[in-house]
Image (cartoon, rainbow, N blue to C red):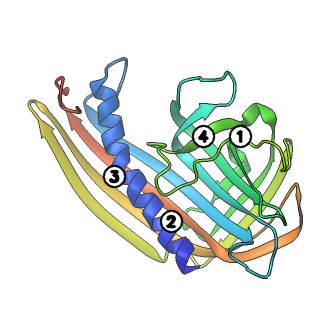
């Protein structure tokens, strides 16, 4: 459980720290990017690791990472499509069979209500049928670089293929850790002030997934939320972001 809690905190810090930079860089690039104003971005995540390797007595298992909020992802079809940044819910799934073969999957949920988290982070649930139409090549919280989170590719050969039924419930005692930090950036007439708020909660989880037999429980699970408050003034000149 300690590993998951540290993992959740790292994800939150990386996402919050990079989110402001990514958003401002988008504004610098033009094309309808973020302009002057006050902004709030919120991401809610839940993760769980079932069976192997967190439980060495098992020979198979699966891991789930869910991100609801501002995400970056690339669609599986059409091929080589550009990354998309939008408010969405992404499910990253890894399955491990008895031969220690790992298969990674990425899905962008067409029905975001399939993933729900309580406001106090005491519970969460994911009940969804993951289809081929929802698959992506990679996906995660902005900036989507894979730092601190899964960087999956679409499932291929050796593992369950869509549609994949995934049912997970998280239960815990609520927020166990929190953090707050502030940063600022100035370049000519452009300025950006950012406040990052993070909340993490350890929990237990129970779940099932197509292709991995049995009903699973784990204490290697967690829920976290990240909130970024951004105040942008002016417009960045060429060269402010390299």
- Callout 3 secondary element: helix
Residue 176 location, x and y as percent? 48, 77
- Callout 2 secondary element: helix
Q: Determine the image quadrant of residue 233.
A: top left
- The outermost residue toward the right is 213
- State how far apart marks 2 and 4 are (Cα): 19 Å
Say which mark, if any, is on residue 8: 2
Q: Mark 4 vs mark 1: which is more N-terminal? A: 4
Q: Residue at x 44, y 75 (%)?
A: 177
Between tags 3 and 1, which lies in front? 1
Between tags 2 and 4, which lies in front? 4
Q: Mark 3 vs mark 4: which is more N-terminal? A: 3
- State how far apart marks 4 and 1 are (Cα): 8 Å
Q: Residue at x 31, y 19 (%)?
A: 30
The crowding category of the residue bearing disc 3, from other C-alpha atoms within 10 Å (few below 14, some 14 to 19, many at least 20), is: many
The crowding category of the residue bearing disc 2, from other C-alpha atoms within 10 Å (few below 14, some 14 to 19, many at least 20), is: many
Q: Nearer the viewer, residue 2 or 161?
A: 161
Residue 119 location, x and y as percent? 55, 62
Q: Mark 3 vs mark 1: which is more N-terminal? A: 3
Q: Is residue 227 left or right of residue 126?
A: left
Tag 4 residue: 138
- The outermost residue toward the left is 188
Residue 181 location, x and y as percent? 27, 61
Q: Mark 2 vs mark 4: which is more N-terminal? A: 2
Question: Where is the C terminus found, in terms of image quarters?
Answer: top left
Q: Is residue 185 left or right of residue 91?
A: left
Check if mark 4's residue and mark 1's residue have beta carbons within 8 Å.
no
Tag 1 residue: 154
Tag 3 residue: 17
């Amino acid at each position: 459980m300690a590993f998951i809690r540290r993992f959740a905190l790292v994800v939150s810090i990386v996402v919050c720290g990079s989110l402001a930079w990514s958003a401002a860089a988008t504004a610098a690039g033009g094309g309808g990017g973020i302009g002057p104003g006050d902004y709030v971005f919120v991401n809610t995540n839940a993760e769980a690791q079932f069976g192997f390797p967190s439980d060495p007595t098992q020979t198979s298992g699966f891991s789930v990472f869910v991100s609801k909020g501002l995400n970056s992802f690339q669609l599986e079809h059409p091929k080589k499509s550009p990354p998309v940044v939008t408010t969405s819910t992404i499910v990253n799934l890894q399955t491990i069979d008895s031969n220690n073969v790992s298969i990674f999957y990425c899905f962008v949920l067409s029905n975001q209500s399939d993933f729900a988290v309580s406001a106090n982070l005491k519970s969460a649930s994911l009940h969804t049928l993951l289809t081929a139409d929802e698959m992506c090549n990679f996906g995660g919280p902005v900036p989507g670089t894979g730092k601190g989170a899964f960087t999956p590719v679409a499932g291929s050969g050796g593992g369950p293929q869509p549609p994949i039924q995934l049912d997970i419930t998280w239960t815990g005692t609520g927020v166990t850790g929190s953090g707050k930090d502030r940063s600022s950036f100035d370049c000519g007439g452009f300025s950006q002030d950012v406040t990052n708020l993070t909340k993490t909660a350890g929990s237990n989880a129970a779940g099932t997934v197509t292709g991995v037999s049995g009903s699973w429980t784990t204490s290697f699970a967690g829920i976290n939320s990240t909130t970024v408050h951004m105040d942008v003034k002016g417009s960045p000149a060429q060269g402010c972001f390299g």
